[in-house]
Image: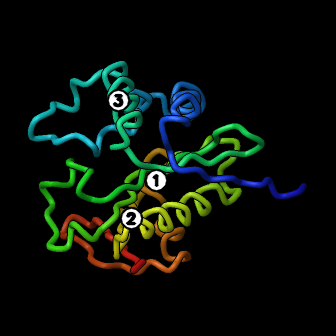
Amino acid sequence: MSQAIVEVRAVSPELLADFLRFFDGTAFSDNPKWSSCYCQCFYEDHSVVKWAERTASQNRAMACERIQGGVMQGYLAYIDGSPVGWCNAAPRTLLHALDDEPTPEAEQVGAIVCFLVEPSHRGRGVARHLLEAACEGLRSQCLRIVEGNPRTEASSSAENHFGPLSLYLSAGFTVHRTDDDGSVYVRRTL
């Protein structure tokens, strides 16, 4: 079987319909419990917004507003013109859920906070294409560092939504720190 060609594009108002087609469709086909997120969790200040009370329609509306306003960033992966994957990657300063974990160089850091790949396309390099596009996109914004927070104990694709540690390490990331709770933070200089 030949390898599918993966095209990755930065989300934009012109791609909003594709973003919604993916999130309304196959993004959470094997994890419907998280289907209400629309990748808004990290854009919200959790000291202000009660995340557990947010509905799918509220998050969908916020995703539309943020994408149309250019304040939500990320990358859609396509195969044969259909969206099959997503990576939420943005300057850390846009991701207000991280505000309670300050870092001195926050203005220079891009954060990768989510990967979603349609189940039928997993294991085919889609996440790797998304990761490289995210790094390039963050570099083009003059950020110096990209950071991820993979879960080393993930036992399912859903728990691996931050991206697998092996993906980051094979792409030149190194472990930056490990917290007392076992959280691993990886970084790569851009």
SS category of the residue bearing label 1: loop
| Position in image of residue 9 (x %, y %) | 58, 50
In the image, residue 89 sits, relative to residue 17, either above or below, namely below
Q: Identify residue type, mark 2.
A: Gln
Residue 188 got which mark?
none
Viewer-nearest residue: 70 or 187: 70
Select label 3 or label 1 by which is in front.
Answer: 3
Residue at numbered disc 3: 65
Select label 1 or label 2 by which is in front.
Answer: 2
Q: Earlier in the sequence, mark 2 or mark 3?
A: 3
Picture quarter containing residue 33?
A: top left
Q: Earlier in the sequence, mark 1 or mark 2?
A: 2
Colouring method of the image: rainbow
Residue 60 visible? The answer is yes
In the image, residue 187 sits, relative to residue 152, either above or below, namely below
SS category of the residue bearing label 3: helix
Q: Residue at x 39, y 65 (%)?
A: 141
Image quadrant in which the N terminus is located = bottom right
SS category of the residue bearing label 2: loop
Image quadrant in which the C terminus is located = bottom left
| Position in image of residue 97 (x %, y %) | 21, 48
| Position in image of residue 86 (x %, y %) | 53, 46
Residue at numbered disc 1: 160
Picture quarter containing residue 3?
A: bottom right
Q: Identify residue type, mark 1.
A: Asn
Residue 30 visible? The answer is no
Viewer-nearest residue: 186 or 189: 189
Q: Identify residue type, mark 3.
A: Glu
- Specify few, some or many for label 2: CA neighbours under 10 Å numbering under 14, 14-19, or 20 or more: few
Residue 141 got which mark?
2
Picture quarter containing residue 34?
A: top left
